[in-house]
Image (cartoon, grey):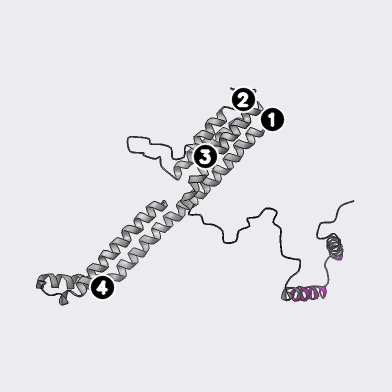
Amino acid sequence: MTRNSVNRTLSRLYWLLTIVLLVLLAAKFADDMPGLPPQIVSVAKNFYEFMRDMSLLIATGGVAYLSNIFQKRSKFVESLEEEWRNIVRTKSALLTYCEKPYLGTDDYLAAFSRISETIDTMRIVYRNAGETEGMIGLYPYAPLHDMRRALQTLDPRVTPEAGHEQKKLVKDAILQAFYGLREVFLEELDLEEPQHTLLISGARRLKVPGAAVSALVHQDLQRRRLSREPAPKPEVDAMLAELRALEKDNGGEPPKRT
């Protein structure tokens, strides 16, 4: 269920809830409204009593309906995320093929199968745009077909001697199609900016080695408790102690083998 579908459904529910509340409010104070016929007042009272008696059942049904909506939305987002991962893997496979010095038929068929599968698996997430009972419609993300067409120009059975410039052109076409696709495909995921960003180049860790006193005390207690127990294999403990000492002397790096 797309974001627009969820918003439309919630909007209808909000309007329905607002109308029902207004009607109930009017029914509650029907006695205080001068000029109303007794029949209308009686109907209003009966309606109010009925809605009050059925309020728990209505609320339960509403909660179940909302849960079903958000469950469908969650499954849709999961499918969309998996499809995007598949697109990224496909893009990487196509670019890897373009970087090969010698283009083999097996490599081409593997890359072509990958993009074909990606194009077809999109149909488990979205239907075609403008699709009807009598018309196929338009594929929702045409850049995937651009990636396929660009790859087909490097078919070694058709172009056995593809040069560096041709490969670079195909790679640029694949990247252009991918970037265009990414710009619109991820909008459905409601992505937000991270709260803790790292926006500078050449960043490094600012924390220094060490730990809180409580952790050091706990470590010392564990070491003392372990030292009171006999070691089943002293040679293993000796080897690990030596490796720890060498690593510590080497600034945290594993000791170099000689």
The front one of 239 and 4 is: 4
* Callout 3 touching callout 2 (CB < 8 Å): no
Q: Which is in the foreground here, disc 4 or disc 2?
A: 2
Taking the spot 39% from the left edge, 58% from the top edge, the residue there is 68
Magenta-tinted stretch: 217-235
Secondary structure predominantly adopted by residues drawn in magenta: helix
Instruction: Tell me, yes or no, whether the highlighted magenta stretch contains residue 231.
Output: yes
Q: Which mark is residue 156?
A: 2
Outermost residue toward the right?
Answer: 258
> Residues under labels 4 and 2: Cα distance?
75 Å
Label 2 secondary element? loop
Q: Amino acid at mark 4?
A: Arg
**Mark 1: secondary structure:** loop
The one nearer the camera, 74 or 11, is 11
Mark closest to the chain's N terminus, 3 or 4: 4
Which residue corresponds to mark 4? 52
Q: Which percent across, then down, holds residue 150?
A: 55, 31
Pick the front one: 74 or 174:
174
| Residue 104 is at least partly visible in this image | no
Q: Is residue 140 left or right of residue 152?
A: left
Above/below status of 7 relative to 94 = below
Q: Is residue 213 left or right of residue 169?
A: right
Q: Secondary structure at mark 4?
A: helix
The CA span between labels 3 and 1 is: 25 Å
Left or right, residue 89 beside residue 215? left
Disc 3 designates what residue? 118
What residue type is disc 3 on? Thr
Queried whether the magenta region covers residue 83, the answer comes back as no
**Residue shown at 33% from the left, 64% from the top:** 61
Question: Marks 3 and 4: CB-CB under 8 Å?
Answer: no
Q: Earlier in the sequence, mark 4 or mark 2?
A: 4
